[in-house]
Amino acid sequence: MSKLKIAELFYSIQGEGRYMGVPSVFLRTFGCNFKCAGFGMPKGELSEEANNIDATKYNDYKMLPLVSTGCDSYASWDPRFKDLSPMLETDSIVDSIMEMLPHNRWMEEHLVITGGEPLLGWQRSYVDLLSNEKMKGLQELTFETNGTQSLQQDLKIYLQQWGINRSRGAITFSVSPKLSISGEKWEEAICPEIVYEYSQVGRTYLKFVVANRQDVEEAQEAVNQYRNRGFRGHVYLMPCGGVESLYNMNAKTVALEAMRLGWRFSDRLQVPLFKNEWGT
Ligand code: SF4
């Protein structure tokens, strides 16, 4: 049986994108190919906030400080916190999921596999996880990804069949490509070929985290590249800000930009509802 290194496993309301408001189980895997230290910082500067946390003081993921700059799920990939994320067998993960579902079985809830970058290292294990008998009732599944990791053949074939056995649009790839606001490099972050590949397996949309007009112009350039490769899905703009003060500063500007371009606006409901705490 295969294993997954799990940073978080929790039940909440999906706060972003297509499934905003839907009760969801979140499976947050450990590991990411990016750092995204630019979020919330003046252009060109990188956050040191997470780096300044003394990892030796914490033995429980939920007790870690929240950050207002950089990646708000830093502990899901920073090697200094890796021991807070247990390696679990897929059967044991499924049992935990059943316990947290309100009816102890899948009803209307949806599963979000997120990260870190969930398609980085665990693709084989998802086949085991989803094949578990108790997961048969699951009808809708989202991968929240940064859009840089190709699908392995085994997973691709499995997901195509999984989707065929369910209603249209059962599988979603929520792709959040990293613009320069993240501090990551364009050539590593914008991968049209890979996003096109996802769109051949499940419903795929782009969700850009932006703060101002300049970020939106970059998003337009990226969308052009994705469209030129054949991507036909929806585009969302989502305000930068894992804390309310930053989020509130950006939200209206971003909503107006989404209206101007005829794109969708994504909220981040976990910020006003739960202050973006761990497990929300
Ligand atoms: S891709 Fe996502 S998880 Fe990875 S560093 Fe960036 S914001 Fe964090």
Image: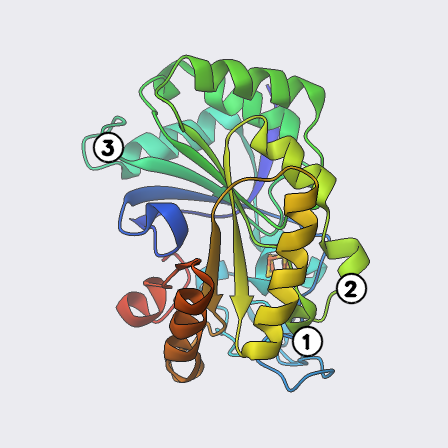
Q: For the residues marked 1 and 2, what is the alpha-carbon distance in whole angstroms?
A: 20 Å
Circle 1/circle 3 CB separation < 8 Å = no
* Local SS, label 1: loop
- Which residue in the rendered view is the most extreme toward the right? 187
**Residue at left offset 70%, top offset 26%:** 152
Q: Which residue is mark 1?
A: 51
The quarter of the image holding the C terminus is: bottom left
The nearer-to-camera label among 3 and 2 is: 2
Mark 1 is on which residue type?
Asn
**Residue at left offset 23%, top offset 28%:** 107
Q: Which residue is mark 3?
A: 108
Crowding at mark 1 (Cα within 10 Å: few <14, some 14-19, many 20+) = few
- Which residue in the rendered view is the most extreme toward the left? 103
Quarter of image, ligand 1: bottom right
Question: Which mark is drawn over residue 261?
Answer: none
The nearer-to-camera label among 1 and 3 is: 3
Residue 5 at x, y = what percent? 60, 41
Describe residue 184's horizontal placement relative to residue 100 as left or right: right
**Residue at left offset 64%, top offset 40%:** 195
Is 259 or 32 nearer to us in this picture? 259
- Colouring scheme applied when the structure was drawn: rainbow
Mark 2 is on which residue type?
Lys
Residue 88 at x, y = what percent? 55, 34
- Above/below status of 38 relative to 223: below
User: Which quarter of the figure has residue 125?
Assistant: top right
Mark 3 is on which residue type?
Glu
Residue 257 at x, y = what percent? 45, 71
**Precedes in sequence: disc 1 or disc 3:** 1
The nearer-to-camera label among 1 and 2 is: 2
Q: Which residue is mark 2?
A: 185
Crowding at mark 2 (Cα within 10 Å: few <14, some 14-19, many 20+) = some
Residue 85 at x, y = what percent? 57, 49
